[in-house]
Image (cartoon, rainbow, N blue to C red):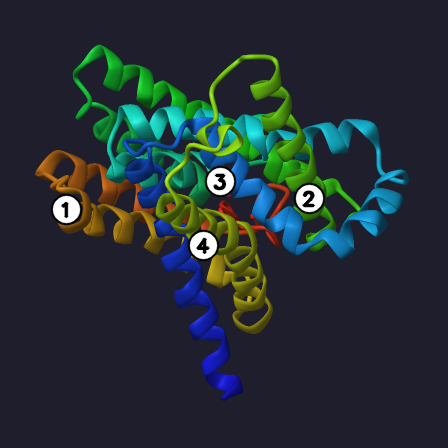
Amino acid sequence: MRAAAGPAALLATVLLWSSFALTTRALGTSGLTTLDLALLRFATPLVLLAPWVPGALRRARQERTSTLALLMVGGLPHFLVFAVGAHLTSAGLTGLLVPGTVPLFVTLLLLGRRSVPRGRVVALALITGGVGVSASTMTSASGSVGVVALLAAGLLWAVYTLALARTTLGLLDVVALVSLGSTVGVVAAVALGLGPSAVLGGTADGSQVLTTVLLLGVGTGIASTLCYAQAVRLLGSGAGAVAGASSPMLTATLAAPLLGEPLGPVLAFGLVLVVVGLVLFHTSGRAPSSARLSVDRRPLLVE
């Protein structure tokens, strides 16, 4: 049983990460607003971790304010930018550009403080080329805006990843605090009239709310985080490489039958370049600052 626990946790992580991209893309056309998706995404783990919150708040007082602020970037700000990109592009691009660009942005943010191994330079070149090829599939003005939004989401997640590497808080502390801050942010945005909310307005469809709670709130907010941590603990940091490379492939593959978005030869070529780059990146020396965190914890995606 123990021998199967690691692979099972890794498989669950990949499935949950892919479901995040697919669900965000699919629910973007539902009756739920973006603020609704954010509210359900963060309020669900907040409720589930309610007993943990008081302790997390006490421990947060010992953390640097700057680190806490950077951790919050991985919550509501990242989610909103990610949702815009998902709405304006495709599930394939959504699942590819964010995890694909995080190692690139992490390296750029640490440039000058750490040397980059030659193998990593080649890996980042492949990732950059793959991102460029993939982005070229969006020829409309709105599609281009969506690509920029997804790249911005990758940058925000890179900032969040580096904040995770420097924080003294535990994993569940981070989830609880980010969920609390993001939930308060959504409620404040609705109260200030910055956007509508069918959930807070009492007009949301119950089945859509339940689906979102299960897939984004429970699946992304809690399950993927714990499964990823378990996979890395049992299989080592190489599990991050497998998950980071497998998730974009699975997302792009499932987008065709589930959302009617065929992969296409150009996006397929870009996908191959990014996946090869991700694998090479993870297998060519230590990660710039966050080897123990991997490139994408969508996962947490507090994607």
Asked if the residue at tag 3 contacts the one at tag 2, i.e. Cβ–Cβ closer than 8 Å, the answer is no
- Residue at left 49%, top 50%? 220
Question: Relative to the observer, which residue lies in front, 248 or 48?
Answer: 48
Of labels 1 and 3, earlier in sequence is 1
- Residue at left 31%, top 27%? 87
Residue indicated by mark 4: 214
Question: Relative to the observer, which residue lies in front, 6 or 69?
Answer: 69
Q: Residue 256 carries which label?
A: 1
Task: Give the alpha-carbon distance from disc 3 to disc 4, as whole Å.
Answer: 15 Å
Q: Which mark is residue 303?
A: 3
Compared to residue 241, the image places residue 142 above or below, namely above
Residue indicated by mark 2: 165
Q: What element carries label 4?
A: helix
- Type of the residue with mark 3: Glu
Q: Position of residue 187 (x, y in %)?
A: 61, 27
Task: Give the alpha-carbon distance from disc 4 to disc 1, as whole Å.
Answer: 23 Å
Asked if the residue at tag 1 contacts the one at tag 4, i.e. Cβ–Cβ closer than 8 Å, the answer is no
Of labels 4 and 2, earlier in sequence is 2
Does residue 230 show up?
Answer: yes
Tell which tag, 3 or 4, sits nearer the viewer: 4
Of labels 2 and 1, earlier in sequence is 2
Q: What element carries label 2?
A: helix
Compared to residue 292, the image places residue 25 above or below, namely above
Q: Is residue 69 left or right of residue 280?
A: right
Task: Give the alpha-carbon distance from disc 2 to disc 3, as whole Å.
Answer: 17 Å
- Residue at left 33%, top 55%? 246
Q: Which mark is residue 44?
A: none
- Type of the residue with mark 2: Ala
- Type of the residue with mark 4: Leu
